[in-house]
Image (cartoon, grey):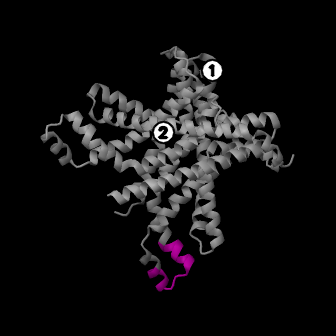
Amino acid sequence: MGLDFTVIPKYFDIILLGCAYTIGITIAAAILSFFGGIVFAVIALYAPFIIRQPFRLIAWMFMGTPLLLQLFLIYFGLVQVGIDLPAVVAGIIGLGLHFAVYNSELIQTAILSVDKGQMEAARTLGLSHSEALRKVVIPQAVRAVIPPISNNMIALLKDSALVSVIGVSELTLSAQRAIGATYRPFEFYLLAAAFYYVINLGMEWVQRKIERRISISR
Amino acid sequence: MDFELMLKVYPFFLEAAWITIVLSVLTAILGLICGTLGAFARLSRFTILRFLGAAYVSVFRGTPALIQLFILYFGGPQIGIQLDAFEAGVIGLGINAGAYMTETIRGAVISIDKGQREAARTLGLSQWQAMYKVILPQAARLMVRPLGVNLNMLIKATALVAAISVVELTYTAQRYIGSTYKPFEMFLLAGILYMIIIYVTGRGVAWLDRKVQIT
């Protein structure tokens, strides 16, 4: 069985729709992971001991296990406790939480490296501890970690392929559907890879733009 | 938490963990080979080799490992490559990991001061001798820690072969989640085993890193 790329046009629509899903899921999960990362960082650094330590243990567990395993846990685990979410939502939550843990590590380091004088000055000016954190320290910390976080977001795009395993019809599963109808795995997976590659290049382009802007404004 | 069930199924998880370990070791070896070749290509004098090296890194880091695995395993037979799931897993993940390791190895080599090479050349060593006897021994020390990070990622990436039905840790967890409807217990079992594997390799890398440093 050789290669025959003429089967592609007929299924191009499905693949494009899958592409749109992949981009949507990536953006939604990226937003969740960004804000989740900030919240997790604050919990890991400032929450009372009794919350902080178990939280750190769970975060450590999420960093040490594969995303695929976590997706199974979230998808089937939520069903077990009676929350029946659509696969798309479970996928976004799974991806978002996984990367939030990684982002949180970056943000924690950044928060700790913001000059102490910033917090002291904010407190002297009459801001409460949480206000100072929210309005002075965190904005500076987040700014510093945007380049490494954008690397994580590119990794997130590629890992979004994993949610096909729990039945989200994004790019990978769309390719699988087309393959189911045509028995042409090589052609369609290659096409999917090409789409991922193009989206990836787009994200890298945006990343360079953002990095340039940050380096100018400094 | 159903501990009785966990006690009953854990031998199967141990067996699966062994498969994950074997898979990780083989993938790491192949990854190192690909990474070394890739780094040499990227540092080569020849434009064509540099281009091929850069294309390898860009394509394999720019597309999902899962898709690469699928192309190899499901698409392979169409172009005459017939592999069983385990072989496809090792080869697919190894080539993928190699792309990441290429950048690690290259990074370590180019961070060695230029003067080292110049001095070696001045002392009469050939291009290759300067590389083998002067640059690489120094670069190797810098590589250990970042290659350890690659290894950590690689171990977690072995979970992907569950999608082509290799019976390793994640596949086993998935199967038991499906048959017992106890996702938390099964996650905990598989998770602990992954953590042990990753912890032990992490300690190994740290030990090696200490060992190769000049004090």
Asked whether B197 or A55 is in front, the reply is A55
Mark 2 falls on what kind of element?
Answer: helix
- Chain to which the residue tagged by mark 1 belongs: B
- Quickly name the residue at label 2: A30
The quadrant of the image that shows the C terminus of chain A is bottom left
Q: Is residue A73 above or below residue A186?
A: above
Whether residue A86 sits left or right of residue B81 in the image: it is left
Where residue A158 appears, as percent x and y from the top left, is 58, 43
- Chain to which the residue tagged by mark 2 belongs: A
Give, as a single range, the part of the protein colored magenta.
B118-134
- Quickly name the residue at label 1: B178
Q: Is residue A151 above or below residue A168?
A: below
Image point 31% across, 26% down: which residue?
A51
Residue A142's disc number: none
Place residue A176 in its image quadrant.
top right
Where residue B36 appears, as percent x and y from the top left, is 58, 61
Asked whether B203 or B122 is in front, the reply is B122
Image point 76% across, 39% down: which residue?
A11
